Amino acid sequence: QVQLVESGGGLVQAGDSLRLSCAASGRTFSSYTMGWFRQAPGKEREFVAAITWSDGRTYYADSVKGRFTISRDNAKNTVYLQMTSLKPEDTAVYYCALDRQQSLTGLRVLYDYWGQGTQVTVSS
């Protein structure tokens, strides 16, 4: 089993920055993808960003490209989401997830493990 624990959420103002962390523990895999998703009230969970663990390739949703940066620290088994120029429409619960394949995908159904989520609220 894999456990994913997110942290770093909070209440910020539009234009502010915030960094989310996701610590992974438990079973390990030789290669995999870590992703961030978010879900706003009344909306579907949507893809935000992903990174391959072995070589650090990244992939972003158009809505966050240029504002968000995903990175990982292999030694700490932690993936980060640095969010800048935050907008009220970024308000959501942010989830990290693990895909056992190194597919660098935005398809939610391909992710095998999920964290509990952390709330990000951006006020205008």
Image (cartoon, rainbow, N blue to C red):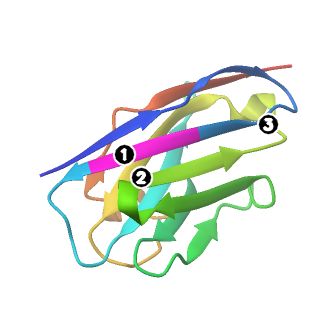
**Earlier residue among tags 2 and 1:** 1
Q: Secondary structure of the magenta portion, mostly?
A: strand
SS state under label 3:
loop
Q: Is residue 7 above or below residue 124?
A: below
Q: Is residue 52 above or below residue 46?
A: below
Residue 68 appears in the picture as rendered:
yes
The one nearer the camera, 97 or 81, is 81
Residue 21 magenta-drawn? yes
Q: Is residue 7 above or below residue 33?
A: above
Q: Amino acid at mark 2?
A: Thr
Task: Name the spot of residue 48 as percent of width and height, x first.
Answer: 59, 53
Q: CA distance from mark 1 to mark 3?
A: 23 Å
Q: Quadrant of residue 27?
A: bottom left
Q: Look at discs 2 and 3 and give the one toward the viewer.
A: 2
Task: Name the spot of residue 83 as percent of width and height, x first.
Answer: 71, 44
Q: Amino acid at mark 3?
A: Leu
**Earlier residue among tags 2 and 3:** 2
**Earlier residue among tags 1 and 3:** 1
Q: Which residue is mark 1?
A: 23
Mark 2 touching mark 1, by CB under 8 A? yes
Task: Name the spot of residue 9 as percent of width and height, x first.
Answer: 56, 27
Q: Which residue is mark 3?
A: 86
Chain part drawn in magenta: 20-24
State left or right for residue 100 relative to residue 70.
left
Residue 44 appears in the picture as rendered:
no
The image quadrant where one finds the C terminus is: top right
Q: CA distance from mark 2 to mark 1?
A: 4 Å
Q: Which residue is mark 2?
A: 78
Residue found 48% across the figure and 29% down from its top = 118
